[in-house]
Image (tube, rainbow, N blue to C red):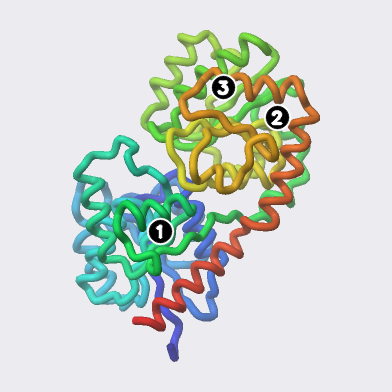
Amino acid sequence: MTRKARVLHVIDSLDLGGAQSVLINLVKHGDRSRYDFEVATMHGRGVYWDSVRALGVPVHSLSFDRLFPGYIAAMIWLCLTRRYDIVHAHLRGANVIAKPLATLCGVKVRINHDHCNDKGSGQSRLAAVLDRFTNRFSTHVVAVSESTREYLVTREGMDGNDVTTVYNGIDLDIYRQRTESSREARARWGVPADAFVVAGIGRLSYQKNFSLFLDVAAGVLARHPEAFFMIAGTGPEEASLRAKAEQLGIGSRLRFLGYVSDMPSLYPAADTLLLTSRYEGLPITVLEAMATETVIVSSRLDGVMEVLVDGEDCALAPPGDAAAFVAAVCTLIEQPDRAARYRAAALDKVKARFSAQSMSAAVTRIYETTLARE
């Protein structure tokens, strides 16, 4: 091209989530000498709105509410007036609605970023059918794990040449430059200085299964009352989770932190990240924990197992198995040498393979290939 290519990233919302972190890193580390980036959220603004604006790119909200279909006219207007070369869709709403509209408006390259192995996760049959059908409008699909790519090819019939695995990456400098000590971080977040601290991080939703997190907390505290738990995040299940914590009698050893904007300041307060999700692609929280030497205990899920090895750099448990999670956390409390080995191995791995720069470079190569082909 004789000019910069125009890229519009479209996402359902800029609320808390790993896909939002990926989008921010793609814009932050994208090649501004060759691409002009813009971002559109299907509705509202969300907690990451200001973070995106701080990157110096135009940000658009296509509708004031998820249920008001103003995003249809707004998306068409943007595509026709801004003349995008690439529309890069993130999450289901953008995939099902924004991407077909971009096709209708003549946008030549439509990228779908498949962030999660949520197939068969309880989504409605209609949502699954629509998601599968609208993949036909994709020029190319980015899968965040090899298992996600395999599903798209073998189960949804996509051409393997049109699906590329690009593992998530994080801005390692942000997480490694912190000099804050564990004691300072715990004082900031109101966590006991001498406790073994277990963190749960993410949206308080069905996917993340924080109800199981609370069951695990109760089981660990029965054996190690000196442990402490904290949950960072907001979501639709917050009220029910707070009520369950009180019913379990663990309220005095648990803190709900709400939305945390400065995640690098939180990890030094934790010894372990506990991920009890029902399904995942490649969770950003896992990479952040690896970079901050926070030991990981996670559900044994396809995307996670592509990155971590049980007994080598983490502890993995069968999804939904509270007893296995309790045993894994208690082992780390009782065997600090094992935890130290996991931390060192995970740090080496994330530095070598999962930077935001390498992720952005891989996506840029997809842009180049698809633009040349179209």
In terms of depth relative to the viewer, which is nearer, 247 or 340? 340
The image's mark for residue 113 is 1
Measuring from the top left, give residue 126's x and y in whole percent. 19, 44
The structure residue drawn at horizontal position 43% and vertical position 88%, both measured from the top left corner, is 1
Res 87 seen here: no
Three-letter code for the amino acid on which mark 1 is drawn: His
User: Is the Cβ of the residue at disc 1 closer than 8 Å to that at disc 3?
Assistant: no
- Sequence-wise, the earlier of marks 3 and 2 is 2
Residue at disc 3, secondary structure: helix
> Left or right: where does residue 215 sit relative to residue 235?
right
The structure residue drawn at horizontal position 50% and vertical position 58%, both measured from the top left corner, is 24
Q: Is residue 32 above or below residue 272?
A: below
Query: For mark 1, does the 10 Å Cα neighbourhood hold few (<14), some (14 to 19), or many (20 or more) residues?
Result: many
Three-letter code for the amino acid on which mark 2 is drawn: Arg
Marks 3/2: CA–CA distance: 27 Å
Marks 1/3: CA–CA distance: 33 Å
Marks 2/1: CA–CA distance: 36 Å
In terms of depth relative to the viewer, which is nearer, 162 or 334? 162
Residue hosting label 3: 324
Looking at the rendered image, the disc whose residue lies closer to the viewer, 1 or 3, is 3
Residue hosting label 2: 186
Measuring from the top left, give residue 358's x and y in whole percent. 60, 64
